[in-house]
Structure formats: C-alpha cells, structure tokens
Amino acid sequence: MQVEILGNADTITEQNGALVIKTPQAEARVMVYSPTIIRICISKNFDKTDSSFAVIEKPLDKFTYQKLTDTIEVSTSALKLVINKDPLRFNFYTADGNPLSGDDARFGTIWQAERVINYRKLYADEKFIGLGEKAGDLNRRGCNYVNWNTDASMHTITTDPLYKTFPFFIGLHSGLTYGLFFDNTHKSYFDFGATTDEQMSWFGADGGDMNYYFFGAQNIRNILEDYTWLTGRMEMPPLWSLGYQQCRWSYMSADEVLAIALKFREKNIPADVIYCDIDYMDDYKIFTWNKETFPDPKGMIAKLKAIDFRLVTIVDPGIKIDEEYPEYNEGVANNYFATYPNGELFTASVWPGRCHFPDFLNEEAREWWGASFKALTDPGVEGFWNDMNEPAAWGQNMPWLVKFGEKFMPEIRNVYGMQMARATYNGTKRILNNKRPFILTRAAYAGTQRYSAVWTGDNAATDEHMLFGQRLVNSLGLTGMSLTGVDIGGFMGNPTPQLMVRWNSLGVYTPMFRNHAAKGMVMREPWQWGEENEQIIKKDIEQRYKLLPYIYSGFYQSAQTGLPLSRTLAIDYTADENVFDVSYQNQFLFGDSILVAPVISTAETVDVYLPADDWYRLSNDEKYTGSQVVNVQCPLTDLPVFVKAGAIIPMQSIIQSTNEHGDGILFVHIWKGDQPNEFIYYEDDGLSYDYQKGAYYKRTLVFDPQKKKLIFSAVEGTYPSKYSKIQLVWHGFEEVGNIEVENNSQPFTIPY
Ligand code: MIG
C-alpha cells in the first residue's frame, strides 16, 4: 500500500464562492460559512451534490483572501487561515495571529488506499473534549476513538465504539479554543496524541473526503452556538417528556401498564410517561399490537390519558418477513428495503426472526415509514422510541455489501439511526397535526438533535456506570444533544436499594429522567425499594416537578442557542484546570446555575470542587466560597447540589403530572450574590407548535445587586402564563420577606 501525501498547489481558482486549489493528488476547497466557521474539503473526486446529513447551512458567496508568494491568507473578522502552497497545508490563527490549530507540516492530509487521514500539530498543553457518547475521561488527550455505530449491549465504561457518532471535538490550548467537525459518515478515527509520542493528533476515515469545519470562536459557548447553527438545534420538546418516565422491558400487558400507572397516582408519586417495550407487538411486527395482551390499545390509552399518563412505544427497524404483514408487502413492492448488489433483499435475524431493513436513506421509504405510525398514533401514542438502529441484528456485523440506494453499508452505517429518527420524527409530526411528538433514538450522527432525544443504551446497575453515564450526558451536550438520558437504575443487573435511590436523585438533574430495566431484572418502580426509600424517591421526583419551569426555560435556551441543559464545567470554567481533574470531571451545571456533584451510592461524604463564584447548597442554603474543594455530607436524601450566588430559579408547587394545572403560583427563587445575573423565563402550551407563531410567554428577570433590585421585563409573546401569581423567595438575604405579585405582562421592579 502506498502513502500519498497532499503535495504542491498547481492551480488556484475561485468557483462559486469557494477557493479551489488543485494538487497532483486531489482538489481542496475552502469555504467560509461565517466569520468564525471555515470549511476545508479535500477530495479526489468531488461529488457535485455536496450533500451532508448533518449540515443545514450554506457557505457565504464571498470572502476575503490574499495571494502571497508562498501562501494564501483567508481572513475574516475572527479568523485567519494561512494556506501554505508547497506543499498544501492549512493553518488556523485568531485574527490577531495566535496559532489555533493546523496541519502537521510534514504530513497534513494523506491517503492510504481509500483511507484519508489528517495529521495535526499537537500543543504541549492541548486538551480535547467532545465526540459525544464516548468512553473515557472528560479530557480526551492521550486517547483514541473509533466511530462505528454499534449495539454495545454489554458495554463497560471503557468500551469503544458505542452507539453514536459525533465527529466533533473542541481543542483547548494556550488559553485559546477551537472546534473541529469532521463531516464524514464512514468509519472514522480520532487520536488525540495517544499513539504518536505526543507529536501529533490525527483523525480520518476509511473512505470519503477530508471534509471538515473549523470553528474559531474564543469561548466554548460560542463554539456550541456555531456548531448548532451549522447542524441545527432541537425544537421545544413536549413538556410531558420532561416529567418522570417509567419504562421496563417490558410491561407485558395492557393490564400491567394500567396497574403501574394507577399505582403512581395512588401513591401520589408524580409521573408523566409509561413505555411499551417490544412485547406489546404481535410477534415483534412493527406497527402491530398483540391481540391477546393488548386487545384494545385505544381503550388502554384512553384510560392512561384519564389519569394524565402518556404512552411511548418502541419500534425497531427490522420488518419481519411474513406475507400476511402489510408493512412487509408494501416494503417489498416499493423497493423500500436495503438490498444486496444483485438486487436481492438483504436479510438478517433479530427479534421478529428473519427481517428486511428499510432503506431510511431513501426519501420515499422514509415517507412510508413515517406514515405507518398511524397504527400507533390512531389509538393515541405520542412518543416513539427508536431502538436497534445502529443497525443491530443477531451476529451484529451486517455485511459491507449491503446496499442503500447507490451507497453501501460502510458509508451508511453511522447515519442509519439518524435517518430512522428523521423518518419517525417527520412522519409522526405530520400525523399528530400540530402536536409535538417525542422521539427517542439509540443510534445517532451529528445533527440528530433536530429530530430526537437520545439515551445511552444498555448500561449496568453499578455506581461506576452511574458516574460514567453522567460523563456521557455531559459529553453529548458538547455535540448539540441536550435532551439526553441514561437508564436510571442501570439496564443490566439489579441495583442495591441505595444505588437506586442515589441514581434516581441524579435523574432529577438529568435532561431526560427515565427509569428502565432489562427483562429478568427485579421490578424497578419507586415502590419496590422499601417504604423509607420510596419516600426518598418520591421526594426527589417531586423536586423534578418543582423545577420544571426552570428546566423548560433551559430547553428554550437549548432550542435558541444550542447550549445543553447538562453542561460539563469545562463550558463555563474552561481555564480552570480543576474541572478536568478526574476527581471532579463528572460535575456539571444543570442549566445556568445549578451545580451537581454526582457521587456513588455508598459514600457518606464527598469532595466537591466549587469553581469561582460563591455557592449555596440547595438543600439548606449553606454558603460556600468558590475556587476550592469542599468536603460535604451526601446522605441518600441529599445529593450534593449547589446554586450559584445571584441565581434566579423559577419553580412551581408539586404537581402529579405536567397535565395538572397546579396552584397557579410561580415561585421565583433568588440567591444573594454580588454579581448581576439574568434569567430568561420561557413558557408555552408545552404541547403544540403554536409557539412558533408567537404563542409563548417570555420575559427576562434581572438580579441587580448594585441597585438592590429584581427587575422583570415586559412579557413577550401572546401566550397567557398558567401562573396567575409570582411569589419571590429570597435565599441568603436577611431582611426580605416573601413577596407575592400578580403575574401580568407589564414590567415591574422589586427593590430589596
Ligand atoms: O435486544 O427492546 O437498548 O433499552 O429494552 C435488546 C428491548 C433490545 C435494547 C435497548 C433496550 C430495550 C431492549 N432492546
């Protein structure tokens, strides 16, 4: 095998706004998307469509560059790209000339047969974060990874690859930040100085182009904003999906589903969602119901609705080969299934037995799949769980000769799950007619936030997995995914009651709060753990419901800016080395101002690193100075959760589900601080898309410690808040009593 190294620039031209540079090996195109986003695409044979599953934006028509003797310099207000001509190498600088990241001068981009790799300079102090759902520590320096979506059913905390592909990372060095998104769907590789003696980092893929987007914003928040501008942001999720979700593989009958739901209501444990895993189907045929165990889905769902429960049902991609099954016949008749190169349908075995697999790359197949959800939406299902879409089958290793349209498995595997989620989302959104569907997917590729929430697959009932899961959630947040969760309690194995309680308390601060367990495991509902533990679990779930106004506003922020709900401390405290320390790396901010320190179930005390800012313990208002490690008590009743000084956190009274109106009081909690702060409060009907037409209620709350005032801006939007009164709750302020005001849309100021 030969190594081809990108050589000297032969010709340099301009074409449709791109700078086109030809070398003997390949052609490079440079495109500017915004002052902070520059794309380089190096290809041996450019595909004219230049399509992407992830990117939804187009490059600018024009940008500024200068041809110099040895280089070409592309300049924006934020970035300078210095293109070395002989040989062709790309180096990024800030506008004022600080080196951000660039090619290794010797190798840069190379090919070995179909494989394309980019070798990059590595800085001595360089750290790397990102790649989404990946094993290992927050700082990925010294590690290497593979992206190849895999049903990692028995994974440990070091398994790689897992289910998803997010080829986007953020580099940090010399006090500078940059991001790099390698938009290539083939099996891909990232090496952050693991195997090149600290000389180089590299990334590449088994095929396709060296196609990457470089982000040059000088803080992580702005890099995430740019990345989610390029790849899209989530829409507002249905409010009910943010409540407590009870799942199991499987509740085996309609009677069992109803009995479980009813028990939540009898016990006054708040909950919104119950799931049907694969056993609700007739012989695992997608879009069917088992006639014996679920004889009247519509009746069952009506009963669930009457007690304010929503139903989510699972779907897998595999369509059973069965001539009596309409989806099978339609798929065959219309060529909706993946094939072998000779045109025969590809067959593999999974739960239903022998199956064919929809070609979700085909738009017509996606439409057909989406429309088939009528069998679930007609009786009233509103949430759609997409499993096994790596894609998975018994034996797992689907042959590389499987064909999707003109493309083969090696290029498609990493986007298959995303395209299934896309089909599910678009189809159910259309059928539900202005009602928001909830989609949950296991496999994903960059951009999946536009269609779906994700969970991290089959974890295990151990403390180690609980902490690891938090790291995954935080890391998914660095790749545009905000509505994320893990199987609380652990999928495989049985948690101790202590672990169940602890994990549930962490679930309160997880974007998606879902309890799930595998077949054969002990029952997991809140009342299975003894009376005392049940009370703790109940109290924690109640805490989740109290926080929903804050959480919902947090998702508004995700939808607007791409900032995730669960944020590694690296986002806001990038320059602070302690946040990368393995002892504190799992800590995160939940929304703007709640800091959570995950801790194992058996610990009675734990060291928590509080970054700069002052902090209050949420449970007792005890005050701490930041930039220090504090050792705090962590009984099972009190997860270490802290609130930033100056925080504004809207809460509500306990309700049993998001359908319940409640007492109509919005409690605005404020913690004393000496720095000004603001919070964007957002509310809408939680169910429809009317918010996109202005039916929302939004106002900015400003805490101004200099003027000793709390300022509520005028309300924007046409939606009437469901809270008729606002009550202020002061923490750390000695003098102030609780104040209650009418919630009208005029601006007002409260002095303290
Ligand atoms: O082969 O549907 O990750 O959450 O309960 C296992 C049964 C298939 C894997 C999912 C898990 C789900 C299970 N599924």
Image: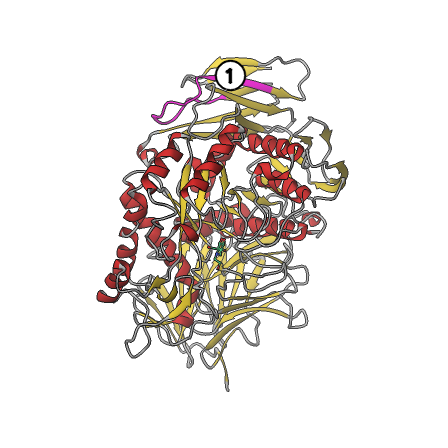
Residue 685's x, y, as percent? 37, 30
What residue sits right under mark 1 in the picture? 749
Residue 752's x, y, as percent? 60, 15
Residue 9's x, y, as percent? 43, 76
Q: At numbered mark 1, what does the secondary structure look like: helix, strand or loop?
A: strand
Q: Is mark 1 within 8 Å of ligand 1?
A: no
The one of 513 and 319 positioned closer to us in this rendering: 319
- Give the left or right position of residue 489, taking residue 214 as reference: right
Q: Residue at x 72, y 40 (%)?
A: 627
474 within the magenta span: no
| Colour approach in the figure | secondary structure
Q: Is residue 104 above or below residue 224?
A: below
Q: Amino acid at mark 1?
A: Thr
Q: Is residue 180 visible?
A: yes
Q: Which segment did they paint magenta?
A: 712-729
- How packed is label 1: few (under 14 Cα within 10 Å), some, or many (20 or more)? few
